[in-house]
Amino acid sequence: MLQISKAIAIPDSEIELSAVRSQGAGGQNVNKVATAIHLRFDIAASSLSDRIKERLLNLNDHRITKDGIIVIKAQSQRTQEQNREDALKRLKELIQSAMVVPKKRKATIPTRSSQQKRLDSKTKRGQTKALRGKVTE
């Protein structure tokens, strides 16, 4: 059971974990031991609320496939158990980021004095630049 928040938990049956061989250099042991973890999580078939599912599917994240499956590969640690914990932690962080609702932006109008200050500073800057021209006698 992966606990996302106090109210939300994902059962282990919805998370598919498989051990694969790690990539890269690592000596003799890398060819024998499957320490990397592939985590697959189907968003549509999960027990998450529809709002969170929709926000996850709308995320622009390379770990989410077009079919709505989150694929995470953890291979930075030396042991399979550490990589499993790392993959679950990254899945938890991804779902928590989708749970945060961004604030709505309120449109504001600049005050008249701030507009005037902006125009005055532009005029002053233009005069400064005009004075840099060639000096004619």
Image (cartoon, helix red, strand yellow):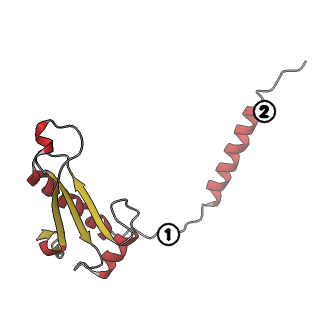
The label number, if any, that marks residue 8 in the structure image: none
For mark 1, what is the residue?
106
Residue 62 seen in this snapshot: yes
Q: Quadrant of residue 7?
A: bottom left
* Position of 123 relative to 80 (above/below): above
Amino acid under disc 1:
Lys
Q: Quadrant of residue 135?
A: top right
* Position of 127 relative to 85 (above/below): above
Earlier along the polypeptide chain: callout 2 or callout 1?
1
Residue 26 image point, x, y percent = 17, 37
Of 115 and 15, which appears nearest the observer? 15
Marks 2/1: CA–CA distance: 39 Å
Query: Measuring 78% from the left and 29% from the top, which residue is drawn there?
Result: 131
Horizontal side of residue 105 vs 101, given as left or right:
right
Q: Of helix, strand and loop, which one carries label 2?
A: helix
Q: Of helix, strand and loop, which one carries label 1?
A: loop
For mark 2, what is the residue?
130
Q: Quadrant of residue 94?
A: bottom left
Residue 66 image point, x, y percent = 39, 69
Amino acid under disc 2:
Ala
* Position of 87 relative to 26 (above/below): below
Packing grade of label 1 (10 A; few <14, some 14-19, many >=20) is few
Packing grade of label 2 (10 A; few <14, some 14-19, many >=20) is few
